[in-house]
Amino acid sequence: MPINQASTVINKQIELIEADFEVLRTWPNRQSDFSGVSADKIAKFTTSCLAFLERTLGRSNIYYEKAHAHVEKLGIGHPHNCVPLHGLIQAVKQDFDNGLLQTLEALVHANVFSDFVEMADHLLGLGYKDPAAVLLGGVLESHLRKLADLNGIRLDDLKNDVSVPRKAEMLNQDLGKAAYGLLEQKQITAWLDLRNKAAHGKYTEYQATQVELFSEGLKAFILRHPA
């Protein structure tokens, strides 16, 4: 995903949060402190704000830390979440619009991955489906690890007192529950299987068209789930 495309995704997410806030602001019989608004709607808004800040800036960023501490103190459906969280999102938007957040890890990460996917597409165009599949598999696994880290999923297991990276399919199973659901989990399992066949020389067990679909699907997946 090129940087300008990732920027569009971030702006779209901010627009959706603004739309949710407008629902709260215009809620019938809303009080100035947002009491009287549905706790479910407030919880949805709160969750969206926290998810956006974590996904875009990371857990160690000051904006996320402030938002998380505020929500942890009051509870996810508390009416006093509304104005402070909206203010934080506005501050992020202002910094982003002024170019102060152009080095966001999510944007750099997406841009680097875009280069590798383009390389894989180039190999496909030259008829080299097998190295293209391996390259796409590497991008997928790296992205799964970034997503797992964002979602608090452990990246390593301890075996014989040695920390070893967890397999991509294990991360996929956990992320299916925490981030993107069973349908995408099954698709990623199929992509990982294709990558494994390419990496182990089973070149006759898949076609170039499947690698092309892998490439297009992976681009869309990274766009839907930036890390």
Image (tube, rainbow, N blue to C red):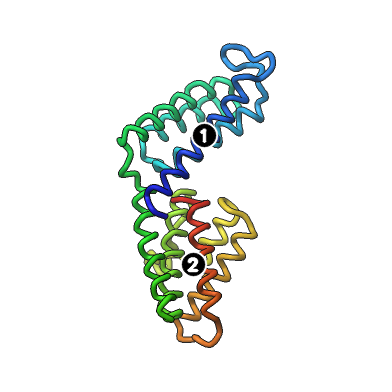
What residue did someone put label 2 on?
A: 215
Horizontal side, residue 211 vs residue 43: left or right: left
How many numbered discs, if any? 2
How far across and down, in percent of the image, does residue 187 sit?
Answer: 59, 65
What residue did someone put label 1 on?
A: 15
Say which element carries label 1: helix
The answer to whether 130 is drawn above or below residue 179 in the figure is: below
Foreground residue among 166 and 148: 148
Foreground residue among 157 and 191: 191
Q: Earlier in the sequence, mark 2 or mark 1?
A: 1
Pick out the residue farthest to the top: 32
How far across and down, in percent of the image, does residue 200 sit?
Answer: 45, 83
Residue drawn at the location 54% of the way across and 76% of the way down: 209
Residue drawn at the location 46% of the way across and 86% of the way down: 201
Horizontal side, residue 106 vs residue 195: left or right: left
- Mark 1: give few (<14), some (14-19) or many (20+) Cα within 10 Å: few
Say which element carries label 2: helix
User: Mark 2 belongs to which amino acid?
Assistant: Ser
